[in-house]
Image (spheres, grey):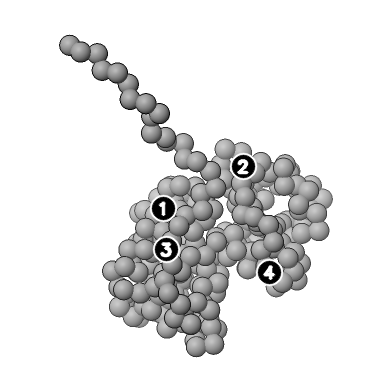
Amino acid sequence: MLLLALDSSTPRVTVALAEVAADASVRVVAEHADDAGNRHGELLAPAITRVLASAGAVPTDLGAVACGVGPGPFTGLRVGIVTAASIADGLGIPSYAVCSLDALALAHRGDGRAVLAVTDARRKQVYWARYDESGERVEGPEVSAPDEISALAQGNLVVGAGALQWRDAFPEHTIDDSDPWPEASMVARLAAARAAANAPGEQLLPMYLRRPDAQPPASLKPVTPR
């Protein structure tokens, strides 16, 4: 089965095409990433087209879609989720949700240590989750100020762009500078067991963790008659 995986929960847009075997093993056949900034909507569709073309595949070859659902900032995250849901609906294939922090942590699992995965949440905050030595998530995802989670870093390998941005909040802790973004290839690996089992598709619900800045007014303003 061909599985299309994507993540747009950070300023980096990443897409991968993976071949999933019956035993849930994964072979990544193509992947692409772009530093998107705020251009997720402009870059994601071309990245998907490029990945399919480089593998000699077309959309109708896909058997499932997997998407990183955050946590992440509102606009970029919505772009990925809406795109993945539209592909799944249009092709009649299942979609699977993956926590983007899980994908980030999985890339560092081979270190054999507990991991604290941290991404930027803006407003001087970070999204984070903590994982034990086996890679199981044991706490989070949550959103906090960097100094509020400094103690959690004790004994953990700290990874992610949020940790690099707020390095001073993690003094004397081991920060891995490599692979600071969730990668679509890791999203594919985390969805592989469900895809191989032909599990029913899931609704792709974004992990926002906080309320949006824009809110509807609590009451209507009176209109002065002319």
User: As rendered, which of 162 and 222 lies closer to the eye?
Assistant: 222
Upstream in sequence: badge 3 or badge 4: 4
Q: Quadrant of the N terminus?
A: bottom left
| Pointer 1 local density, CA inside 10 Å: few below 14, some 14–19, many at least 20 | many
Q: Position of residue 109 (x, y in %)?
A: 68, 70
Residue indicated by mark 2:
125
Q: Is residue 115 visible?
A: yes
The residue tagged with tag 3: helix, strand or loop? loop
Classify 48 as above or below 194.
Answer: above
Q: For the residue marked with disc 4, what is the amino acid? A: Gly
| Pointer 2 local density, CA inside 10 Å: few below 14, some 14–19, many at least 20 | some
Q: Nearer the viewer, mark 2 or mark 3?
A: 3
Upstream in sequence: badge 1 or badge 4: 1
Q: Position of residue 129 (x, y in %)?
A: 65, 56
The residue tagged with tag 1: helix, strand or loop? helix
Residue indicated by mark 3:
203
| Pointer 3 local density, CA inside 10 Å: few below 14, some 14–19, many at least 20 | few
Q: For the residue marked with disc 1, what is the amino acid? A: Arg
The residue tagged with tag 4: helix, strand or loop? loop
Instruction: Kindly give the residue lying farthest to the left in the view shown.
Output: 226
Picture residue at 64% right of the left edge, 55% below the top: 140
